[in-house]
Amino acid sequence: MTTDVRAGAAGSAPGAANDGQTAQRKKNSVLKRVRKKFRIFSIRSGMDLPFFFLILVLLTIGLVMLFSASYPYAYYNMNGDSYYFIRNQVMFAVLGVAIMIAVSYFDYHHLHKLAIPILLVTYLLLVAMLVLKDSVFVPNIKGAYRWFYIGPINFQPSEVAKFSLILIFSHLVSLNFDKMDTFRYGVLPYVLILGSIALLVVLEKHMSATLIILILGAAMMFIGGVRLRWFGLAFAVLLAAALYLLVFTDLFSYAMDRVYGWLDPFNPPEGVDTWQTRQSLMTIGSGGLLGLGLGQSRQKYLYLPEPQNDFIFAIVCEELGFIGALIIIVLFAMLIWRGIVVSLKAKDKFGMLLGVGLTFQIGLQVILNIMVVTNTIPNTGISLPFFSYGGTSLIMLLAEMGVVLSISRNSAIEKL
Amino acid sequence: MAKGTTVRMWRRTIFVLLVLIVGGFGTLVVSLFRLQILEGEELQTRAVNQQTQDTSLSAKRGTIYDCNMKVLATSADVWKIVLDPNYIRKELVPKEGNENIQDVIAERLAAILGKDQETIRALMEKQTYYAVAATKVETDVKDQILELKTELNLGNAIQLEPDYKRYYPYGAFASSVLGFTNSENQGVTGVEASYNSYLSGTPGKLVTAKNAWGIDMPYQYEQRVEAQDGYSIVLTIDEVVQHFLEKSVAEAAESCQARNRACGIVMNVNTGEILAMTVKGDYDPNDPYTITDEADLAAIAAIPDDEEHQEERSEAIRTAQEKQWRNKCISDTYNPGSVFKMVTAAMGIEEGLVNENTTFSCGGYYRVADYNIGCWKTAGHGTETFAQGLSNSCNPVFMQLGELLGADTFFRYFEAFGLTRKTGIDLTGESNSIYYDAAGLGPTELATSSFGQTFRVTPIQMITAAAAVANGGYLVQPHVVSKIIDSDGNIVSTNDTTVKRQVISEETSARVSAMLQETATTGTAKNGYVAGYRIAGKTGTSEKIDEWNAAGREGEKMYIASYCGYAPADDPEIIMLVFFDEPVPQNGEVFGSAIAGPPFAETMAEILPYLGIEPKYTEEELAKLDISTPGVVGQSVESAQTTVSNAGLTYKVYGEGDKVVAQIPEQGESIPKGGTVVLYLDAESAAGTVTVPELTGLTLSQVNARISQAGLNISVSGAALTGSNAVSDTQDIAAGTEVPAGTVVTVNFVDLEAVH
C-alpha cells in the first residue's frame, strides 16, 4: 500500500503528461471535445476505471435490491403499483450516471470559483428552511424539517451543505496552506463555517446530518493540517458541555428512556416506540448465513417500515445473508479505498482534499446507516448511498462521484 | 511549498481511512455477525412468529358405538363462518361501487345466519383478518353463504372453515354414560370426558404467512399438518339392554315420583362390563344446557327475571344443569340398606360364624349399647334360621351377625369388597364412599352397618360388591368401554376384565346365592321374580337418616327404595341394581320392594331372553306359563276351534260366516293357559268393542274373573305367580277404555308382604 502510493507520488512523469493534457483540453475546440468524448469508452481513458466500475456495480446491486425491497410496500401503498419506486429510481440512476460522466469531464479546478457562491447558496437554503418552516415548502415530517419541496422536486438542503462544506474547506486549505499554523487562517474560518452550518442543520432537527457534517468537517480540518492541540481543546470543550448538560440540565435523564429503548429494543420502556428497530433486527437475523434468497424477504411485507429507504440494508441482509451483506460492505470498503488512493494522487491539495472529503462522506454514510440498521447506534435517519430510494439525492451523489472521477483524470494514478 | 499532497496530509488521510475501514466497517461486520450468525436463530423465530398465522384444523371426533356397533354418538360436518375485516376494508371497500359493502354483507349475512345485523357489522370494524361470525353452521346454510359470496363477488371476505358437530342419534338415551361435548368439541362428562384424549384426535395446523396487515403474502408459504381424526370407542353398553332398563326405570320413577332422581345399572357379573346404566332425570346430550327437570324449571321460573336476581337466577340454572349432568350411579352416595345384607351374609358364611340353619330370634328389635334398634317388622319375626332371616330381611339377625363378626373382621371384609375405594370405573366424576374404619365402628355403628345403614357408598360400589358375592367371590373392576378402534376399525386397545381380588370362596358365593334365590322367590324380594330365570335378589328400603337429621327430623322421613339382584342364581351372569331416591311415601311408608322390584323384574324379563340366557321353568311355573296364540285367520270355523283348543286355550265366536276373518289376540301374542281367543267371522263384528274393567287392588283370581267376563285376555307380571298375597297394582290399559274383544291387558302384581 505504502509503496504503491509513494510510487504514484514519486512517479511524476505520467502526471506531468496528464497535466499538459488537461491544460490543452481547457482550450479545446468543439470538434476536439467530440473526439475526446469517444475516449470515455476507451480502456485508455483518463478516468479511474476501478472506481467507476465499483460505482456501477454498487449502483446495480442497489437497484436490484431496491426493487426487491420496495415492491410489496409499493403494492400496498401505491395503489397496487409494485414498480413505483424502481421505475423512478432507474430513471434517476440513468440520468445520474450520465451526469456523473459529464461532470468527470468538467475540470474540478473551476470549483475554486464556485466554492464561495455555493457556500452562500447553502446558507440561503438553510436559513430559508427555518424561515419557511411549516409551509408547503418545508413541511414538518416526524418533527423535523429536512426536506425542501419545490414543485415536483424535493431535496434535503443538508446534502447541499455537506458538499458545500467539503468544497469550501478544500478551497480554503489549498489557498492558505502555508498559514495553517496560525489561528486566524488555520482554525477560525473553519470553526466559524462548521459551527454555523452545524447550528443551522441542528435547527432543522436533522441530527444525523449534523453528526455527519461535524465529523466530516473535523476530518477535513485534521487532514488539512489543523494542529492537534485545537482538536484537544475541542474535545475538552465538548466534554465540558456534556458534563454541564448532564449535571445542570435534565436533558440526559429525558433521553434515558430512549437509551433504554436502544439498549433493549425488545423490551422498551413505556412510551418508547422501537418497532422499526425491532423489525430491522428481526429482518437481519432472519437472513442467517446465506439468506432467504433474492426476492424472498418476508419482513418487507409491511413489517419493516420503509424498506426501500433507510432500512434497505436490513432487507439485503435478510435476502442475501451474512455472506451477501459482507460482500456489499467489502465493495463499499473497496470504493472508499480506491477513492482515497485516487485522491491522494491528485496533483494538487485542492483536488486531494475534495476527493478525500467526498469519499469519506460516502464511507461515513454507509457506516452510520448500517450502524442504525443493526442498532449499533440509536435510530436516526441516514440513507444508504446507491441503495436507498431518492431521486435528487442519487443524482447529487453521482454528480459528486463525477467530481472524484474528474480528479482521477488529473491524478498521477496509474491508468488501467 | 509543494503544490501536491504533503506527507503529513498523506499520513493523516491514511489514519482517517484506517479508522473508517477498521473501526467503522469492522464494527459493521461484527454487528452483522452477531445478529445473523450468533443471534440469528432467535431473531428469525421472532420474525416467523409475527409473520405466520396458525389456523387450527379440526380433527373429526371419534364415534361412540354400543357393543353391537350401533352408533350412539357421532360427529357430522358443520362449518365455521369467518370474516376477514381487514380484507373487506382494504380490498373490497375501495372498489368501485363498494362504498356500502360492509352494510350489505352485514345485512345479508345476518339474514342467512339468523343473527343480529349490528353484531355482524361490529365484527367488520375489528382490526383483524379473522373474526368468527358463526360456528357449527349446517351445510344448507353454508351453501347459501357460498351463493352470497359469488353473488356479491366477495373474494376472501367470508371464509368457510370445516368443523364438526356432535350428534347423539338416540337423544337422551344413555346420556349419563355418553356425556356430552362443549362448543370446542371437548368432552364435559361421561365417556366423552373420560376418553376425550382418544376421541378428540389431534387438531391439524395450517400455517400461512401473513403480512403486517394480516393479508396472505402473495408468494407460497404454507405448511399444512393434517388433522388426525379421533379414535372411536366401543362401549360395553348394549343398546337393547339400555333401552329396557331406561324404560322400566323411567316408568317406575314416574309412578313413585322419586324426588331425587332414580338410577339403574346392569352389569356382567363376571367381567364388570356395564351393559346399561341410566339416570332419570338426565338430559339430552344434543342439548345439554336445557334443563329437563320440571321442579327445577318451576323453581327457576319463580325467580324474578330482573337485574337484582340475575345472579340468583344464573346460580339456580347452573345448579340444575350440574345436577342433571351428574351421573347418580357413580357420583352420589347412599345408604344401601337391606341390599347390603347379602354382603354381611357372605361375611358370616365365609367366616363360618353362621350357616343357613343357624337359628336366631327376633323380638322386633335388638338392644345394642343401651339402644333398642328396631326391625322393620315391629312385631318381630320370632325364631328363624339365618336363611329365613335373610329372606325376611330381619335386622336383629344381622345385628347379631355383626356382633359375631366384630368390627375388625367386618371392616376387613368391607374393605375387601372394595367399599373403601373408588371402583375405578372409566367415567369421570366417581365419588368415594363415606364410612367408619375399624376403630370408628362402635357397637351401634357396627350393628347398623350390618344392615346397610350408617355408611354411604355409591351405587356402582354396591353393585360391584354384590357382583363379588354372586360370581364366586371375585371383585371385578366395572367398565363401560370395551375397546378403542381407529378409523379403519383396527383395535387400538381393549379393556379386559380386571379381577382385583377374591373376597370370598366360590362355595360361600354359591350358598349366599341360593339363599338370595329363595329371598327373591318367596321372601321379601319376590317382586323381582322372573319366571324361569332363578333370580337371586334383595330389596332395600333405606332411611335417609343423614338428610333427615340434617333437616331436624321434621316433616316426613325420606327413603331410598332399591333392588339388587342377579340371574341365574346357580350360574350368575347378569346383575342389576335399581334405585329410587326419595319416592313419595304412600300412607307415610315406603316399600322398597313394591317400588324397585317391578322395574327390576320387568327389565330382567326382557333382557335375559335377549342375552340368550335360557329359562328353566319349574313344574309350578310351567303350569302357569303363557301360551303363544296360534294363527287361525282364514281357516274354517271348525278347524280354527280345534287348533285353539289343542293349544290349551278356549275360544269365543262372534258374527256370522264360515271362515275366521280376524282373531284377537293375534298370532304369536302370549296369553295365560286357558285364555280366550276371540274368533270373528265377519268384518262388522270385528269392529265391535268391549270395555276394560277396573283391575287394580284385586287378587289374581279376582282379576282373572273380571277379564274373562269382559271377554278380554290377561298378561300377568310381577309377584302374582309366587306370592300368595299378591295384589294387582297396575294395568296397562286404563279402566273404561274401549278395546276389541280378546285384547291382552297386562296387569302387574305386588306382594305387600314383601315390602322391605
Image: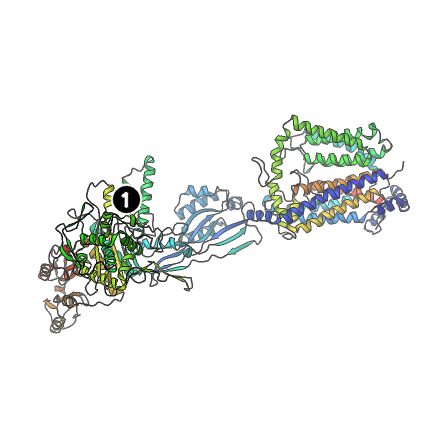
Coordinates of residue B320 in the picture (x, y in percent):
31, 45
Q: Nearer the viewer, residue B565 or B508?
A: B508
Q: Nearer the viewer, residue A375 or A340?
A: A375
- Asked where in the image residue A396 lies, by quadrant, the reply is top right
Coordinates of residue B224 in the picture (x, y in percent):
52, 56
In the image, taking residue B21 as reference, residue B619 lies left or right, namely: left
- Residue under the point 79% across and 44% down: A339
Coordinates of residue A152 in the picture (x, y in percent):
67, 38
Rendered view: B506 above or below B583: below
Coordinates of residue B92 in the picture (x, y in percent):
51, 46
Q: Which residue position holds label 1?
A: B297
Identify which amino acid the numbered label 1 is placed on.
Answer: Leu
- Residue A149 shows in this picture: no
Q: Residues within 10 Å of mark 1 (few under 14, many from 20)?
A: some
Rendered view: A91 above or below B464: above
- Give the position of the N terminus of chain B as an image quadrant: top right
In the image, taking residue B27 as reference, residue B594 lies left or right, namely: left
Rendered view: B473 above or below B295: below
In the image, taking residue A39 as reference, residue B109 lies left or right, namely: left
User: Which chain is indicated by disc 1?
Assistant: B
Mark 1 falls on what kind of element?
helix
Rendered view: B709 above or below B551: below
- Residue A345 shows in this picture: yes
